[in-house]
Image (cartoon, helix red, strand yellow):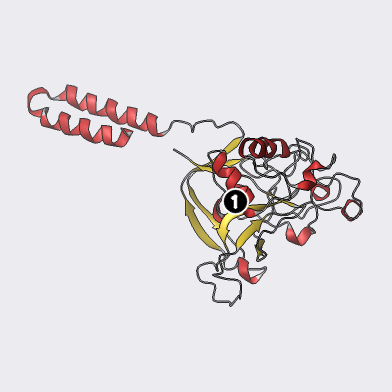
């Protein structure tokens, strides 16, 4: 029974008996209300590997960028959890072994296939199947953006200043590594501490771009035409090791119109409803 329903029932009982008792019932009602308040203020359950995102509204989109990011608008979301890091090769390997799903051939490479690196070369269906197997789901676009942005409307997970060499930027783009297959292009989830959102979610600007549950549709109030709207096309969010600075903004949307698309800079993370 929820604390609020318990309060209602007990207050009804107290009210019914108030003609016989007086002040003791008032004291009891106060205690019940205090208990309900304490129950509702309980900290969220801790789910290992996931970050709790509290309920509330945030500013989604941008007015000063690509047409499909406009207009900036408020979105209200219930509380939820999101993976603190992207799903790793090791985690995905366990899923593939348990279900018989084929492991992307690229992950047999001794560089890209390290267990601690984010899994790549997975299709949307692969990511969705993993999420269901893990008892989770893919995040919506709004959930992904709030987890990366917080509630202050920032452009990047770390704030509004653009990325720079030697820190966040190298987690996202390197022209040298881009053309040299012998180097690792992705990094373990905690490698760049600066690529962290207001909630502590990691690598939402760099490392790998991420599949979401959302399909490509215009935001409310957006009357710009786009031939890809309404086609059931899934959206990738977040920058990757191959992205330039313009593509690292939180609000950037990438509609993928190719069936079965996979790439060495695309991975995913999962979300879960708060109970």
In x, y percent, where is residue 150? 59, 49
**32 or 106: nearer the eye?**
106
Residue sitting nearer the eye, 188 or 191:
188
Residue lying furthest front: 100
- Closer-to-camera residue (188/125): 125
For disc 1, the marked residue is 144
Q: Quick one: SS at disc 1?
A: helix
**Residue 76 shows in this picture:** yes
Task: State the residue at coordinates (54%, 67%).
Answer: 219
Q: Residue at x 90, y 55 (%)?
A: 179
Find the residue positioned furthest to the left: 19
Residue 45 locus on image (x, y percent)? 49, 31
Q: Quadrant of the N terminus?
A: top left
Horizontal arrangement in the rendering, residue 39 relative to residue 232 (left or right): left
Against 98, residue 257 (above or below) is below
Q: Is residue 231 above or below residue 178?
A: below
Q: Position of residue 159 (x, y in %)?
A: 69, 50
- Whether residue 152 is visible to the viewer of this picture, yes or no, is no
The C terminus, quarter of image: top left
Vertical placement of residue 180 versus 34, above or below: below
């Amino acid at each position: 029974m929820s604390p609020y329903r318990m309060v209602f029932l007990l207050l009804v009982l107290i009210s019914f008996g108030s003609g016989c008792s007086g002040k003791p019932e008032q004291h009891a009602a106060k205690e019940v209300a205090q208990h309900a308040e304490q129950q509702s203020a309980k900290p969220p359950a801790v789910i290992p590997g996931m970050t709790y995102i509290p309920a509330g509204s945030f500013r989604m989109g941008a007015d000063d960028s690509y047409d499909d990011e406009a207009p900036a608008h408020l979105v209200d979301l219930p509380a939820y959890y999101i993976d603190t890091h992207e799903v790793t090769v090791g985690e995905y390997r366990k899923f593939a072994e348990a279900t018989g799903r084929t492991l992307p051939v690229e992950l047999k490479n001794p560089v890209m296939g390290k267990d601690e690196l984010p899994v790549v070369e997975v299709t949307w269906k692969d990511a969705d199947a993993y999420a269901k197997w893990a008892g989770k789901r893919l995040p919506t676009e709004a959930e992904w953006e709030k987890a990366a942005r917080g509630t202050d409307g920032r452009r990047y997970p770390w704030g509004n200043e653009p990325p720079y060499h030697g820190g966040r930027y190298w987690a996202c783009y390197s022209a040298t590594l881009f053309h040299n297959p012998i180097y690792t292009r992705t990094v373990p989830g905690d490698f760049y501490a600066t690529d962290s959102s207001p909630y502590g979610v990691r690598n939402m600007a760099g490392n790998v771009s991420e599949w979401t549950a959302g399909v490509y549709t215009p935001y409310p109030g957006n009357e710009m035409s786009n031939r890809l709207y309404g086609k059931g096309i899934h959206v990738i969010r977040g920058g990757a090791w191959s992205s330039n600075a313009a593509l690292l903004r939180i609000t950037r949307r990438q509609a993928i119109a190719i069936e079965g698309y996979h790439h060495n800079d695309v991975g995913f993370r999962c979300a879960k409803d708060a109970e």
